[in-house]
Image (spheres, rainbow, N blue to C red):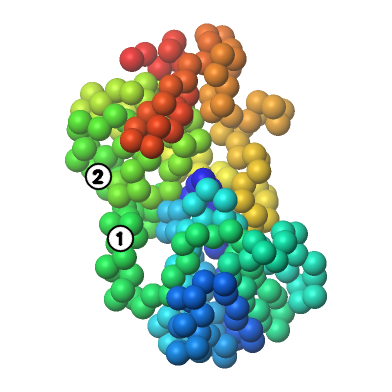
Amino acid sequence: MPEGDTIFRAARTLDRALAGHNVTHFESVLPKLTRVDVDKGIRGRCVERVEAHGKWLLMHFSGGLVLLTHMLMSGSWHIYRPGEKWRLPRRAMRVMLATEQMVAVAFNIQVAEFHTQESLKRRAGFSTLGPSLLATEFDPSEGAARLLMHPEMEIGNALLSQSIVAGIGNVYKSEVCFACGVHPFRKVASLTPNEVSCLMATAREFMSANVTDASGSQIVTYQGLRRTTSRGNPDERLWVYRRTGEPCRRCGSEIQSRKQGPDARTTFWCQQCQPG
């Protein structure tokens, strides 16, 4: 599943391409979206802005209408010049909207809904989101306080909980715990104040480093460019994620992995650098 940095970059690029321009064409294979287009009209509306909140992407139109999308495991947004060949087949298209300058296409997106600001407040899964780690106004102390409100949760599960802070996915969960020397299967209650601060600050630092303009501007689903080690060798870009059985980049111990949480997501750690 794309993580918060991927969605942030997608929203930023869509915003640069579409914001301030009127929709000249709208199309969807999703009946609920088509119904809204027929009843309220998407064509002619101005795309006011596109933004991300955690793993959700919001496209704001004039008149107070918002297109809310979530990529889940396989979705992606692409942009094209008018007449440019799409990189994925048309059968994968779920939503397409065009301005005179650009065409935006959502492929294989399973969650796509029109909302007003009021209905967004009631939307399950979105209305309960915690603060976004990549928001300009993100307050690490608030994130730390929200984390500590769940003392019985395992730390790895807590970092994935979007109601605590929004944006962390399975890659960052393992990478952040490693960077802070925290075993992901410990309970939140066992964290020291310094460890809590480290988790919040490192999560924001890692994600922010992967949304700079230099980190790329493509808006397709992440294909493995994410980096947390700051090392130049592309084969050494991550500390522990998907490195089961390989030597730790710090101490040489064997990287461990195990399923964690109700969704059985695989967690990776170094037993030596992250004592249990």
On the rendered structure, is 46 left or right of 166?
Answer: right
Residue at 60% x, 86% y is 22
Classify 10 Å Cα crowding around label 1: few (below 14), some (14-19), many (20 and above).
Answer: few
Image location of residue 103, percent across then percent down? 68, 74
Vertical comparison of 1 with 181: above or below:
below
Q: Is residue 16 visible?
A: no
On the rendered structure, is 55 left or right of 90?
Answer: left
Q: Is residue 210 visible?
A: yes
- Which residue is nearer to you in this view: 276 or 107? 107
Place residue 85 in its image quadrant.
Answer: bottom right
Residue at 52% x, 9% y is 253
- In the rendered image, the quadrant that contains the C terminus is top left
Place residue 209 in its image quadrant.
Answer: top right
- Residue mark closest to the camera, 1 vs 2: 1
Q: Which mark is residue 146?
A: 2
Residue at 69% x, 27% y is 235
Q: Which residue is mark 1?
A: 124
- Which residue is nearer to you in this view: 134 or 36? 36
Vertical comparison of 8 with 120: above or below:
above
Vertical comparison of 163 with 26: above or below:
above
Residue at 72% x, 79% y is 101
Measure how far apart labels 1 and 2 are at the Cα level. 19 Å
